[in-house]
Amino acid sequence: LKCDEQVAAEAAGEDASDFGVPELNVSYKPQKIAPKFQGSVRQLLHKRIRDAYVHPQFISDVMRPMKIDPVIDQEVQHLSGGELQRVAMALALGKPSDVYLIDEPSAYLDSEQRITCAKVIKRFIMHAKKTAFIVEHDF
């Protein structure tokens, strides 16, 4: 994908690297989550977000309020919908990214967990100084 300025600079034989669409790292939490991983939540977190899930700031800002510790040794395949949703949120926020795309973060969560999840997302995005796009149909 090239902008008009980039095409013109290339046609003139100039350096066009300052133009165009910037490359961004994106973290995506889909609306529907299927528990495909064979193993425990701890193994999944270790495989996907090894550095984040043991970081003290991430533990206090995400892991503890999302109540990941009570399910950390359970098999991913045996998690309830709400437990799976909380783990998926931790995975999405634990991936170092420029932009976070979060689809239906409150699906399968009870009313108290929904509020906690919204606060966790807001606090994380504000502290990390990142951008998030969140799709939620319940508000």
Image (cartoon, grey):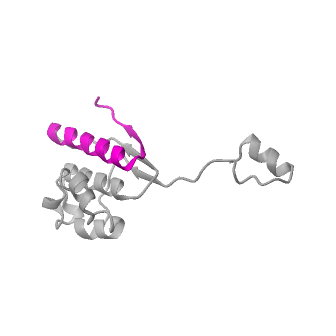
**Quarter occupied by residue 109:** top left
In this image, 6 relative to 43: left or right? right
**Quarter occupied by residue 136:** top left
Q: Is residue 107 visible?
A: no
In this image, 134 relative to 85: left or right? right
Using the image as rendered, state which of residue 87 and residue 62 is in the foreground.
62
Q: Is residue 125 magenta?
A: yes
Q: Is residue 52 magenta?
A: no
Where residue 104 appears, x then y in whole percent?
A: 33, 41
In this image, 48 relative to 61: left or right? right
Q: Which residue of the protein is positioned furthest toward the right in this rendering?
A: 12
Which contiguous range is marked in magenta? 111-139
In this image, 28 relative to 137: left or right? right
Where residue 91 appears, x then y in whole percent?
A: 32, 57
Q: Is residue 114 visible?
A: yes
The count of marks equals 0
Q: Is residue 69 above or below residue 98?
A: below
